[in-house]
Image (cartoon, helix red, strand yellow):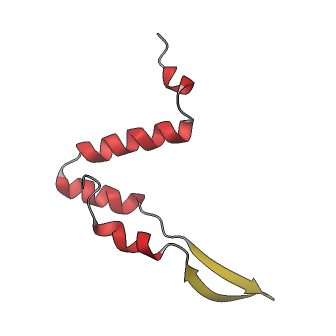
Amino acid sequence: MSSATWRNFFTYNKYAQITARAVRQSLKESERVVAEKRGATALKYQQWENGVGGTQVHLNPEEVKKVGKSAAV
């Protein structure tokens, strides 16, 4: 059996997501919290006109608030 049989079932991005989740869940609590914070993303939008940036708008503000929560819950 080939070592790349996961390719028959998942895209690379899905495979990377699954393995990253497994690694984060296997860490001790203190290291896991730090790893989860690195994995959180915040999406912002800013309209630029004539070389001047407007105000930044968070497109997913609820995701920013979830950063402190555990992935195991």
> In the rendering, at what x and y percent does residue 56 appear?
59, 84
Residue under the point 41% across and 57% down: 39
> In the rendering, at what x and y percent does residue 13 appear?
54, 42
> In the rendering, at what x and y percent does residue 16 appear?
47, 40
Q: Is residue 57 above or below residue 11?
A: below
The image quadrant where one finds the C terminus is bottom left
Tally of marks: 0
Horizontal relation, residue 36 to residue 63: left or right = left
> In the rendering, at what x and y percent does residue 60 appear?
50, 72
Residue under the point 70% across and 83% down: 47
- Farthest residue, direction top: 1
- Farthest residue, direction left: 29
Residue under the point 45% across and 44% down: 17
Q: Is residue 4 visible?
A: no
Residue under the point 25% across and 52% down: 72
- Farthest residue, direction right: 50
Q: Is residue 19 above or below residue 28?
A: above
Q: Is residue 26 above or below residue 68?
A: above
Q: Is residue 59 visible?
A: yes
Residue 40: image quadrant is bottom left
Horizontal relation, residue 41 to residue 33: left or right = right
Residue 53: image quadrant is bottom right
